[in-house]
Image (cartoon, rainbow, N blue to C red):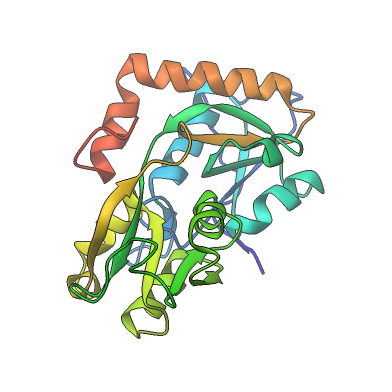
């Protein structure tokens, strides 16, 4: 069940009120998925890179927004069902997804990595033969695994990043295949000290995008303009440095 976090953000430019007559934009992000989206233990409020990006997009577009946490694999179905309007959850563009939703320009890029107990395996077809590989459901990582390792390994899907990491640590699975940015962030935590990157990073797709209902072409164009505004103003760099030690654009 999705959890509704911070409601109705009145986001204005230059001190003016949100655009009169425009409907509230219902935005979904995928949490827990640190550092992109997670609950701040100090405040109990949703935060993270995707959350901040969503808020900044709404501010630049001068639109009122409602931000909700939705499981990654439910975001596109809920957009299609018109339960939400927009997903800010780092989705890569694929032909299958393009049949259902609109895509913005990229707002960050990342590679994917295998993570496991150091020294236990090699991330090759031969090295992963007979192994259990964990991955988040309905992601480009899952598609890649099934195409590359589906004939030799068992692909085990999970609903979120935390579940994958816990399964790796408990040795329920042999290795995880995850987005590199949350993967590297996890390695810096106390729990992450027990894992390491296995093999070389793998680039899937050309970047991660905002997704929208097919009817929201005007909003898609406004989001593309807002991404460039963030880049030119330096605001994107501020948010980048808040969560990452390197440029993720």
Residue at image point 42% right, 76% down: 131
Query: Is residue 215 positioned above or below 76 on the image?
Result: above
Residue nearer the viewer, 227 or 106: 106
Depicted 184 relative to depicted 130: above or below: above
Q: Is residue 192 above or below residue 141?
A: below
Q: Position of residue 187 (x, y in %)?
A: 22, 63
Counting every numbered tag in the picture gives 0
Query: Residue at the spot x=46%, y=70% of the render?
Result: 134
In this picture, residue 161 sits left or right of residue 192: right
* Residue at the extreme front of the image, as rendered: 126
Toward the viewer: 151 or 160? 151
Residue occupying image coordinates x 26% and y 57%: 199
Q: Position of residue 38 (x, y in %)?
A: 42, 59
Left or right of residue 237, residue 88 in this image: right
- Give percent across and percent down for residue 48: 39, 50
107 with respect to 101 (left or right): left
Q: For residue 16, say whether it is visible.
A: no
Q: Residue at x 24, y 75 (%)?
A: 117
**Quadrant of the image containing the N terminus:** bottom right
Tell me the quarter of the picture where residue 121 sits.
bottom left
**Residue 249 visible somewhere in the drawing:** yes
Q: Quadrant of the C terminus?
A: top left
* Percent position of residue 88, x then y: 54, 42
Front-most of 152 and 215?
152
Placement of 116 over or under 43, stated as above or below: below
Left or right of 80 in this view: 170: left
Q: Which image quadrant is residue 85 in?
A: top right
């Amino acid at each position: 069940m999705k959890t509704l976090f911070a409601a109705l953000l009145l986001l204005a430019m230059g001190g003016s009120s949100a655009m009169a007559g425009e409907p509230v934009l219902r935005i979904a992000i995928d949490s827990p998925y640190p550092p992109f989206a997670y609950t701040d233990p100090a405040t109990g409020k949703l935060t993270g890179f995707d959350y901040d990006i969503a808020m900044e997009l709404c501010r630049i577009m001068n639109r009122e927004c409602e931000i909700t946490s939705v499981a990654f694999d439910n975001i596109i179905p809920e957009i299609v069902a018109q339960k939400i309007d927009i997903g800010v959850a780092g989705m890569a563009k694929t032909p299958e997804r393009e049949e259902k939703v609109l895509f913005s320009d990229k707002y960050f890029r990342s590679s994917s990595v295998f993570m496991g107990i150091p020294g236990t395996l090699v991330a090759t077809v031969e090295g992963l033969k007979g192994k259990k590989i964990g991955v988040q459901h309905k992601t480009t990582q899952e598609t890649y695994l099934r195409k590359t390792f589906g004939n030799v390994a068992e692909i085990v899907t999970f609903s979120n990043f935390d579940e994958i990491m816990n399964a790796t640590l408990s040795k329920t699975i042999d290795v995880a295949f995850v987005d590199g940015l949350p993967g590297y962030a996890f390695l810096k935590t106390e729990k992450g000290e027990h894992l390491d990157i296995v093999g070389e990073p793998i680039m899937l797709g050309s970047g991660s995008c905002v997704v929208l209902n097919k009817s929201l072409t005007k909003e898609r164009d406004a989001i593309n303009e807002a991404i460039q505004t963030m880049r030119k103003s330096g605001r994107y760099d501020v948010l980048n440095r808040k969560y990452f030690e390197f440029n993720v654009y």
